[in-house]
Structures are given as structure tokens and as C-alpha cells.
Image (tube, grey):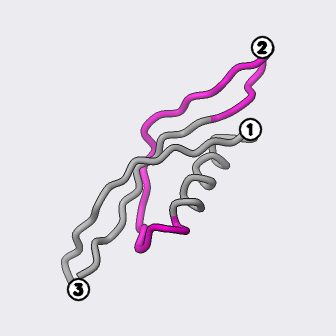
Amino acid sequence: MSDHVYRLSEIVGSSPVSVDEAIRNAIGKASQTVRNIDWFQTEDIRGQVVDGGVAYFQVTVKIGFRVED
């Protein structure tokens, strides 16, 4: 087993449907340009309220990805 070095990047995902979908949108989009994503952690959850209802969920996500040798 080799030792791994990770780098962190902070991204924000959004969704009109749910927090879960906001996270999945963020990870899905990041994985199109960032290789070796191994984990994530949520930092903040925010939302937009319009006319007394939730219009959007916004989640700040830190992604950890392995630095290549």
C-alpha cells in the first residue's frame, strides 16, 4: 500500500430539488475536469427563499483528490 497525498478544492453545487442533488451536481461537474476524486465533505448549506418557499439549495463541498506521482 502506497502513501497518498491529497489536495483539497472547495466547490459549490446548487439544485432546485434537494441538498442531495446539489452535492451530486457539484461532484459530477468537478469529476469532468478533476481526476482521482476520492472523497468529499460538506461545509455549508444555504438556500434561496422565494415567495415563502425554498427555491434553491446551495451546498459548499470540499473535494479531496489524490496528487499523482
Quick one: label 1 or label 3, which is nearer the N terminus?
A: 3
Residue at x 56%, y 53% (from the top left corner): 26
Asked if the magenta segment contains residue 27, the reply would be: no
For the residues labelled 2 and 3, the Cα–Cα distance comes to 53 Å
Residue at x 32%, y 71% (from the top left corner): 66
| Principal secondary structure, stretch drawn in magenta | strand
Amino acid type, mark 3: Met
Q: Residues within 10 Å of mark 1 (few under 14, many from 20)?
A: some
Question: Residue beneath label 1, please?
Answer: 16
Please provide percent x and percent y for residue 30.
Answer: 51, 60
Q: Residues within 10 Å of mark 3 (few under 14, many from 20)?
A: few
Residue at x 66%, y 24% (from the top left corner): 48
Quick one: label 2 or label 3, which is nearer the N terminus?
A: 3
Q: Residue furthest bottom?
A: 1
Residue toward you, 33 or 20:
33
Q: Quadrant of the N terminus?
A: bottom left
For the residues labelled 1 and 3, the Cα–Cα distance comes to 42 Å
Residue at x 70%, y 20% (from the top left corner): 49
Disc sitting over residue 52 in the figure: 2
Chain part drawn in magenta: 31-57
